[in-house]
Image (cartoon, helix red, strand yellow):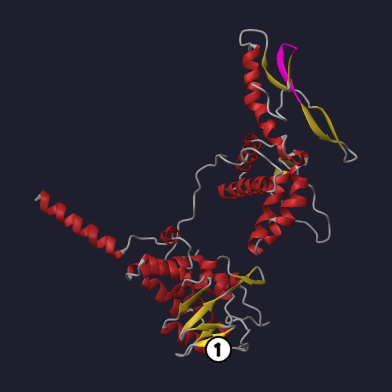
Amino acid sequence: MARRRLQQKGDLYEQGGFWKLRWKEDQRLADGSIRYAWSKPVWIGPCEGRDRLTEKQASRIAWDNFLSRLDQNMRTPQSIMTVAEFVERKFIPEHVVMKKKAGRVHYETTLPHVLGGIPEERRSFKGHKKGQPLPEIPRHFGIGGMRVRDVTHEDIQRLVSEAIRRGYSVQTARHIRNVASAIFTHAERKNWFNGRNPAHFVELPEMTRRTPIALSFDQLKALLSMLKPLPRAMVLCASLTSMNIAEVCGLRWKRVNLSAESVIVDGESIPGYHAAVREQWYRREWGTVKAKARRRNLPLPSLLVEALRALRASATFTGPGDPVFAGETGRPVDQQAMLRHQVRKVAAHLSVPKLGWHDLRRTFDTLADQLGFTIGERKALMGHSHAAMTLRYTETPSEQARLKLEALGEKVRGAVN
């Protein structure tokens, strides 16, 4: 059978009792020019002794482990660029910059681990004086210096395994793997890489998650009764409308309709006693909500309407463009400071000292489920694209399911009797 155009043949030879392999490839020189020359030889296996390989066996190993993959990437000569160069020239300007603030921050914090490797120790700022350079910490197994075409599944697995060995969480290791996968997905999309994404099938330990928290009706009532007006209104927003904290802080007065009549805002109709979720406040930046399904109009229960009216009557910043939950400067309040100094201090008296803003969103879904809200209703209110995500927020089986299980038990009781 005739060989395909550009198919790698390679040079298999014996040296020092071993089979070795080399092949012709594009190589980047120090001045940036490219030459076509022999690669560095790779070890295939012994050609002498008890476990020696025949030439046919060595040829098969050479093809399966090296030449077949090279044959794929010979069609993309750009892949001789290093991963770090690709990330700087293509991945960041074409992929990362298109993300929202949360996505950009995620890549900025994770890319150093992917490209430079896992630090030997966590960086400590103890005793460090402002303005002085921080000492360099050695890193291991980064793929930034490797050519795009040379990165293998084993390289990504070694990087992720090193993160686990150094004490990083499974979630951080997952982020490292996913960012590496995104790099090669983009390279493939731009025809800079052929073959299987090397981050696929990288194994991770089982993740141990924090025990989810969902308040009961009595706990939520007690929490609200002890909070000051501003944090009380924020907790009501999160627990009665399902908004996440970025959406709560990003709510402006012009999109909160506290009257019975519909109003028109920015060309959109907001029904009476509804809030229009269109923006979020994340890391001190305004931005659009993170997904299309999150653009929604949420009904406001009378309890929340009363709390918001009282808040507006006493607030300094009540203009149409002002945030509903404004701090002293007129910008949205520091939600982390509000959580630490107000909400958690009260929650500690209810035996839930680690209560977070996201737990209030979980509380909404759990309590709504207990009151008989359908999965479709909860999905729409929470702004989820898929019902499966909504179900992950429900901490207990639905009341309907509980009643059916009780009926099943009674049937079994009758059968046993």
Q: Nearer the viewer, residue 404 or 118?
A: 404
**Residue that lies at the very extreme toward the bottom in this rendered image:** 313
Identify the residue shown where x is 65% and y is 24%.
Answer: 63
Where does residue 52 sit, x and y in percent of width and height?
Answer: 63, 11
Q: Is residue 173 left or right of residue 261?
A: right
Where does residue 255 sit, x and y in percent of width and height?
Answer: 55, 82
Q: Is residue 54 above or below residue 222?
A: above
Q: Quadrant of the N terminus?
A: top right
Quarter-wise, where is residue 67 in the image? top right
Residue under circle 1?
A: 312
Disc 1 crowd rating (10 Å Cα; few below 14, some 14-19, many 20+) is: some
Q: Amino acid at mark 1?
A: Arg
Q: How many discs mark residues in the rendered view?
A: 1
**Residue that lies at the very extreme toward the left in this rendered image:** 417
Q: Nearer the viewer, residue 140 or 268?
A: 268
Identify the residue shown where x is 33% and y is 68%.
Answer: 370
Res. 48 visible in picture: yes
Where does residue 342 sit, x and y in percent of width and height?
Answer: 54, 74
Q: Which residues are magenta?
A: 14-23
**Residue that lies at the very extreme toward the front in this rendered image:** 2
Predominant secondary structure in magenta?
strand
Res. 215 visible in picture: no
Q: Nearer the viewer, residue 131 or 144?
A: 144
Identify the residue shown where x is 74% and y is 49%.
Answer: 87
